[in-house]
Image (cartoon, rainbow, N blue to C red):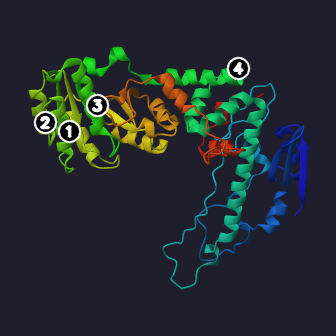
Amino acid sequence: MNVRKFIAATARDALRKVKETLGPDAIILSNRGIPGGVEIMAVAARDMEMIVPTPERDAPRSKEYTAAAPPAPMPGRVTARDQPLLRGMSPALGQASARPNSRPPPTPAVRPLPQVELEVPQSLPHSGAKPEAEVVPVAVMEEIRTLRRLVEQQLAGFAWGEAARAEPVKTEILRQMLDVGFSPQAARDLLADLPSELEAGQALSWVKGAAERSLLTINSESDIVDQGGIYALVGPTGVGKTTTTAKLAARCVLRHGARKLALVTTDGYRIGAHEQLRIYGRILGVPVHLARDAKDLRITLHDLQHTHMVLIDTIGMSQRDRMVSEQVAMFGASNVKSLLLLSATSRGDTLDDVVRSYSRLDLAGTILTKVDEAASLASSLDVIIRHGLRLYYVSNGQRVPEDLHLPNRQYLLHRAFKDLPESSPHHLSGLEPGLMMASSAVGLQSAGGQHG
């Protein structure tokens, strides 16, 4: 196989050389940045096909059988026709290579990996022997897929390096955000309008400011304890609903007295759950009511309609539990606002799942619990910001009511952007941020701006 090396000042020039020398179907084996330019290793398509057979060329056709799929390009092949791949192997790589000053062309969609599907006609006789065309070289296909993955990784690293050279400050802030636990989507959104002239310290302050403006919170003037109303505390098992209900109850009693508050529990399933809330109610001098279904709840809330504040402690359940729908129906007939409790110790994708499941309720906002147990607040604040939830309170301990606070946005975001120690096994290094952006299908173009 005749592998050729091409060196040029830019990826565009190198690809032009590849196409002129080996043709538009030349296969790119590797690429890397070198001092002063780009180096691409490529091979002519005819040479690759001599050592890597394709099913269309080498599989003999049976007279009684025809493959349903038409001939397709070899899976995993990265050719010189795919020039945009060096600017964006996928939406995750954006357009990271250098461009002329003319208006950049739109990034074309990446060609999906062709699927090899073989259909056997219903009338094919059962002879015991498989038609020859049905035999697929599995080992060859796996080799090709492996080659494609390697090329994608190399191009992801190439795009990351191009972005780092074009806008080093923005790329470094992006790395820091991914490092501490922000999602690629949130990092892209917050960095989209970052001014290019800012230095590193100024850029980080700018991004923190953008995050602070995006984080919706209440303040002392909009504290629901003073405004009153009917609120149900909902969320998964173990997130701290009963303890948080007690903290809010104590906060209300301290300001307005025990007569202004009533407690309701819908948790008649867990052993001792009702009794735990009754203990808190007895300490605070507040009545505790049990509502087993929607009818009980309507009657109870009607009796408490003149009470300043009613807090409803609910049963904990998985976000995938069918009882979430029952809870939606239970509160739907009453004038109940829900506060979704999110644990700061949970992964971002888990919190996303929780928010999606409970969004069918009339969510007034959220309460962030277990802040004292979380190593980082980036993932939880990321979810709250992306879903546009309003943060009502922050819980950071078991003490009632001391460990419940109104949110301090500057402090929370300071915790969220706090760098990981170099020794942390979760610290991203080298090209890992670029690969992470690639696997998450988030463009470097949005985070790194237009390069020209």
Whether residues under marks 3 and 2 lie with C-beta atoms below 8 angstroms apart, the answer is no
Q: CA distance from mark 1 to mark 2?
A: 10 Å
Query: How many circles with numbers are drawn on the protein?
Result: 4
| SS type, badge 1 | helix
Whether residues under marks 1 and 2 lie with C-beta atoms below 8 angstroms apart, the answer is no
Residue topped by disc 1: 277
Res 401 → quadrant: top left
Res 352 → quadrant: top left
| SS type, badge 4 | loop
Residue topped by disc 2: 289
337 w.r.t. 119: above or below: above
Counting residues from the start of the chain, the first of labels 3 and 4 encountered is 4
Counting residues from the start of the chain, the first of labels 2 and 4 encountered is 4
Q: CA distance from mark 3 to mark 2?
A: 18 Å
Counting residues from the start of the chain, the first of labels 3 and 1 encountered is 3
Residue 220 in the image: x percent, y percent? 36, 16
What's under tag 3, amino acid-wise? Lys
Residue topped by disc 4: 198
Left or right, residue 147 beside residue 261? right
Residue at point 81%, 28% (across, down): 100
What's under tag 1, amino acid-wise? Leu
Whether residue 21 is visible here, answered yes or no, is no
Counting residues from the start of the chain, the first of labels 1 and 2 encountered is 1
Whether residue 257 is visible here, answered yes or no, is yes
